[in-house]
């Protein structure tokens, strides 16, 4: 019981930092384009962590770890690049709606990659969580959502969410013997290398507000808290609770982002309450069952 409470507290802390990145990343847009800000976060996080981890990284790294973490990092980078490309032909609201499908995508891909069958009761819980997150999201927006008008950007972002789910699942499959801090460092280092050509070609570096203190303050927050800390916690949590339960907590992101805004609009907050309750119910049901990954999937 105590361990379950500890896991849930860490999961809540992780998802709170994830939710803050949605808000703070928007504040960085006037100072740098999304590709530049993402690449700079990875590069700066790698540089900050290097003095503490370089000896261990050199001692443990081998061709197998390098190959596996290159693929793990690639899927994470593809998520970010897919998001940026998708927003050219779709809206932020539509990507947010598709993002609520992430835990369900993880359930499907967990079966494909890890051969882990999710019980029907848990699948129902994931559907409830998706509906709850979607309810909260739509309760706080005035934008009309026309689902029948599927766009190219929607398809791109759906593929990007599959990449993010695969990123988390592959951490579970391959990273069981790598300490969380070291795993996070490998992801940041290799992600930086993958992003470097995109930064040079599409980062619009001449228009980055290098001289603005607000740019550096915002970038440092995103680097330390929503990159280094969340990557470390994710490495730790995936091994303990599994990818599906980890991603299930992303159902809370709409609530964590919009509730502070809703304090100024009681009607919207009231209309979102059923969605919040559905989300909490789903998390309770999912937390009650946490099937273990067979050891053979770690190989």
Image: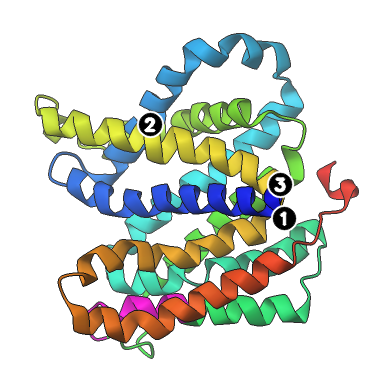
Residue range highlighted in magenta: 132-144
Q: Which residue does the image show at 29% across and 30% down from the upper left?
A: 220
Q: Tag on residue 240?
A: 3
Viewport quadrant of the C terminus: top right
Q: Which residue is mark 2?
A: 224
The residue that mark 1 highlights is 1
**Taking 106 as reference, is 33 above or below it?**
above
Task: Give the vertical position of 6 relative to 121 (above or below).
Answer: above
Q: Is residue 152 magenta?
A: no
Query: Furthest residue to the right?
Result: 296
Name the main secondary structure of what is drawn in magenta. Answer: helix
**Label located before the other in sequence (3 or 2):** 2
Which dot, 3 or 1, sits closer to the camera? 1
Looking at the image, is mark 2 or mark 1 nearer the viewer?
Answer: 1
Q: Quick check: 166 above or below 51?
A: below
Image side of residue 10 versus residue 206, left or right: right
Q: How many marks on residues?
A: 3
Which quadrant: the N terminus? bottom right
Based on the displayed image, in which of its 4 quarters is residue 235 positioned?
Answer: top right
Q: Which mark is residue 47?
A: none
Crowd class of label 2 (few under 14; some 14 to 19; many from 20; radius 10 Å): some
């Amino acid at each position: 019981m105590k361990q379950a409470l500890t896991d849930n507290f860490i999961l809540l802390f992780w998802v709170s930092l994830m939710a803050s990145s949605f808000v703070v990343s928007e504040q960085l847009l006037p100072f740098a384009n999304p590709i530049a800000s993402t690449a700079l976060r990875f590069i700066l996080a790698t540089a900050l962590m290097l003095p503490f981890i370089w000896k261990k990284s050199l001692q443990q790294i081998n061709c197998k770890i390098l190959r596996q973490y290159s693929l793990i990092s690639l899927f994470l980078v593809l998520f970010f690049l897919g998001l940026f490309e998708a927003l050219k032909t779709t809206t932020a609201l539509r990507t947010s709606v598709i993002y609520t499908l992430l835990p369900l995508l993880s359930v499907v891909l967990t079966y494909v990659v890890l051969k882990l069958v999710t019980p029907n009761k848990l699948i129902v819980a994931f559907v409830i969580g998706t509906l709850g997150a979607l309810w909260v999201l739509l309760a706080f927006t005035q934008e009309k959502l026309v689902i029948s008008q599927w766009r190219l950007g929607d398809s791109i972002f759906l593929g990007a969410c599959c990449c993010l789910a695969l990123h988390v699942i592959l951490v579970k499959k391959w990273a069981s013997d790598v300490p969380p801090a070291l795993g996070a460092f490998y992801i940041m280092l290799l992600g930086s290398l993958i992003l470097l050509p995109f930064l040079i070609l599409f980062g619009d570096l001449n228009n980055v507000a290098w001289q603005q203190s607000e740019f550096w303050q915002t970038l440092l927050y995103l680097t330390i808290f929503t990159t280094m800390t969340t990557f470390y916690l994710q490495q730790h949590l995936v091994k303990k609770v599994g990818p599906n339960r980890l991603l299930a907590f992303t159902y809370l992101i709409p609530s964590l982002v919009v509730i502070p805004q809703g304090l100024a609009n009681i009607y919207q907050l009231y209309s979102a309450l059923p969605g919040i309750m559905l989300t909490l119910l789903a998390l309770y049901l999912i937390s009650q069952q946490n099937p273990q990954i067979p050891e053979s999937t770690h190989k």
